[in-house]
Amino acid sequence: MKEHLIKDTVWKEIGDRIKPLATAISKEDKDDVDQHCSGLDGKNKQVCVYIVRGVQDIYKIPKETGGKEIERINNRKFKATMQCVILNAYIKKLEEQAEESSCSIKQGIEKAFGENEKIKTSSCPEGITCEVCNREYCPNQKIGDKEIGTELITRLNNNDQIKTTLSTIDILCKDCTKEPTFCDRENMKTDINDRAIEMFKKISKDSKNMETHCRGNSDPTSRIVTDTEKTACKFITAGLKYIYEIPADPKENRKYGTEALDNQLFRRTMACLLLNAYANKLQGEVKSPCEVSEKTTEQAFDRGNKERNTWCVDSDKSKCFKCERAPDLSCEIGGEKVKEKLKTMLNQNDANITQTLNTLNTINDNLCDRAQCVTTQWTRDRREGDKKKWEKEIWDDGDMPNILKELSNSMKNGNTADDPLCTNINKNSGTPSDAEKKACNYIVTGLKHIYGITEELGDKPPQRKKNDKRFKQTMACLILNEYGKLLGEECATKDTVQKAFTAAQDFHNTQCKQQPCEKCTWDTCKKFKIEQKSQREEIRKRLNQDNDIKSTLTTINDLCNQSTQPKVTNTQENSGVARSGKPPEPSPGPGPSDDSSAKAVDTNSQAERSEKGKEGDDAHEAKAGTGPMLTIGTKRAQVEVIFPTITKNEDDSCPPTMTRTQCEAAEKFTSHYSGPNTGEAGTGKTDGATSPQTPSKNTNDEAS
C-alpha cells in the first residue's frame, strides 16, 4: 500500500512538470532562441525553437527554499530529470506527427541538442550543478504498472499548449500530393486568388484601426518607431486579423465530416503565405531612407499574434492556426514553388496592394518627410535603457552643427576651379555670368561632399552605422537646399541653383562612395518641424551665422556687382549727362518740354546738389549712359544708375531679378529724385523749384 502511494505521488509530480514545460515551449514572447537555431528555416527551425525553449526551462529550474540542503538539491534534480523525460516524449510525438506527412525534422532536433552545452552555460542558475538533458527516450520503462512512453504521450495529448505546437508542425509538414482533403481541389487557384483579393481589401480598410498595436515604445530594440515602420506594422497586423477571422463553413462537410475544418486550415495557410510574400514586397519596394526591415516585419507579426486568441473565431482557441513570419517561403505545393507563385499574384497590380504600397512610399515623398524619418531613427538609435533622446537634441548634441560645418568647409575650400557642369549651366539660353558659374560650383561641390559621406568606423552596431550615414546625407541635403535659397536671393537666381541640382543628378550614380546612398535633389518643402519649430528656418539662421557660408555669399555678391557695372563712354568731366548725337526727348507731364529744359539739366543739377547736400551729390554722381526708367508707384523719374535696367513693380516691391543690394540702392537713389514732395512725374517741380530732367534711355546728345 505504501509503495502504491509512492508511485502515485511520483506520477503526480511528473504530471505537474508537464504544464511548465508546455508553457515554456509554446510561449509567444520574443526570446533569444533564434541564435541557437540559425541556418534553419520552416519546420526544422520551428522544431529547433520548441526544443531549445524546453531545454532552457529545464536548466532554469531553481533550488527550493526551506528544508534540508540535501533535500533541496535532490528535489531540484528530480524535477529536472522528469522534465527532461517529458521533453523527450514530446520530441517523439513530433517525430511521429512528421512521419505521417513524410516530413523530416531531424535537422531541427540535432541542431537543438548540438547547442546543449551553450544553453546550459547561459541558463543554469549560479551556484547550482545542472545535469545535461540528453536525447534519450525509454518508453518501455515503468513506474508502478504504467509504461513511461504510453502514459506521457496520453498526458501530452491532453495539454492544449502542446496540441497547438503539434498543429503548427503538422501544417508546416503538409504535402499536397499526399493530403487530398487538405490540398487536392480543382478550384484551388481560384480559391487562393479570391482569398488574396478579399484579404487586401481588408488590409486597406482595417489598417487604420491597428494604431494601438503599432505604437512606438521606449524599447531600444524596437523597430516600429518611424512613420514608415508603424504603417507597415498596421498593414501586417490587419492581415493577421483577417486570417484569424476566416471561419469554417459546416456546409462543406461531406464524406469525412472534416472538410470544413480542412478547408478553413487551407484558406488560413494560403492567406498566411500570401501575407508573408506581401511583407517581403513591402521590404523591397519602400523608398529609402526609412525602410521596412526584417526586424520590423518580425516585430509586426509578434504584435499581431499577441491578439490571436482575441481575433480567432474558433470555439477552441487552442486549435487556432498561428500565422508566423516565414521570409524564405521555400515550400512547394504540388511541385510548384510557392514563392514564385505568390510573387506573380502580388505583381498583378491589385488596386488595394498598389494603394498600400503608395501609402508607404508617399510617407517619404519629399525631403522634409525623409528628414523627419531619419531624425526619428536618430533618437531611437541613441536610447539608453529608459532614457529617451528627443528630436531637438540633433542640434544640442552637435550632430547637425557638425554636418553644417563640414558641408560649408567643403563648399568654400573645394571650389577652386570651375566644374565642367557649370561652364554651360544655361545650355542654350546664353553664357552664364561669373556669379552664376560660381553659385553652380558651390552646389556641385556640396553634392559631391554629400555623396562622399561614408559609414563611421568603430564598434557601433551595423544598423546604427547605416542609419547615421543616412541621417548625415539627408540632413546635409536639406542644408544644401536652404543654402541654395540664399544663393537665389543674390543675382545668381533660383533658376540657376535648380539647374545646378539637375545638372548633377548623375552624381548619385558616379560620386557615391558607399551604398546605400541617399539621392539629393532640389526640394522646396517646408513642413519639417521639431516642437512646432521650422527646421528650415533654423538651418537658415545657422547658415547666416557660419563664416564660411557668409564668405561664399560675399563672393557671389561681389561677382554680381562686377557684372552689373555699365560701360561709360563719351563722358565729360564733372558732367552727369552722356553725350548724344541728337537732342533729348521731352519728359511726360505738364512741365516744360522744349529743348531749353533739357539743355539746362547740368546747371540745375549743380544747383540742386548744393541745396540737397552730400547725399544728393553722391547719388547724382553716378555715371550716366545706360539709365533705366525706374517706376515707383505712379511717380516716374528718368534716372541713370550704376545697376542694370530695372523697373520696380507697381506695389513698390523689387522684381526677382534685382538683388537686395541693388534694391536698397535703387530705393535710396530714387527717393532723392522722386521723393514724397515731388510733383507729378515729369513736371520738373520740387517745392516750387524746377527739377532736373535727366535724359531718357535713348538720349545720347551732349547737353549744351
Image (cartoon, rainbow, N blue to C red):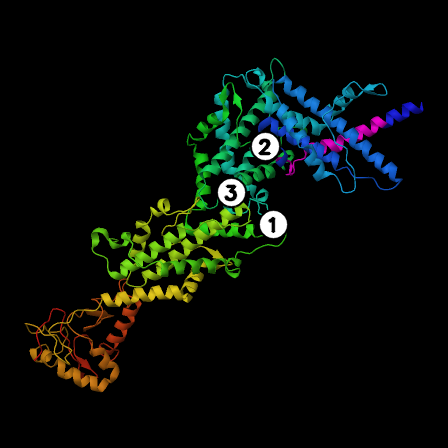
Secondary element under disc 3, as helix, strand or loop, is helix
Secondary element under disc 2, as helix, strand or loop, is loop
Pointer 2 with pointer 1, Cβ within 8 A: no
Residue 310, position as x, y percentages in the image:
64, 35
> What amino acid type should be assigned to the residue bearing mark 3?
Thr
Q: Which residue is mark 1?
A: 218
Q: CA distance from mark 1 to mark 3?
A: 18 Å
Work out whether mark 2 precedes mark 3 in sequence or the reverse, and give the earlier one: 3
Residue 346 higher or lower than 566, as above or below? above
Residue 284, position as x, y percentages in the image:
46, 37
The range drawn in magenta is 10-34
Name the foreground residue: 173 vs 507. Answer: 507
Please, what is the dominant secondary structure of the magenta stretch? helix
* Left-right relation of 359 to 257: left
Q: Residue furthest right?
A: 1
- Residue 490, quarter of the rendered image: bottom left
Q: Which residue is mark 2?
A: 324
Work out whether mark 2 precedes mark 1 in sequence or the reverse, and give the earlier one: 1
> What amino acid type should be assigned to the residue bearing mark 1?
Ser
Q: Which residue is mark 3?
A: 231
Work out whether mark 1 precedes mark 3 in sequence or the reverse, and give the earlier one: 1
Query: Which mark's residue is nearer the viewer, 2 or 3?
Result: 2
Q: Residue furthest top?
A: 255
Q: Residue at x 83, y 28 (%)?
A: 12
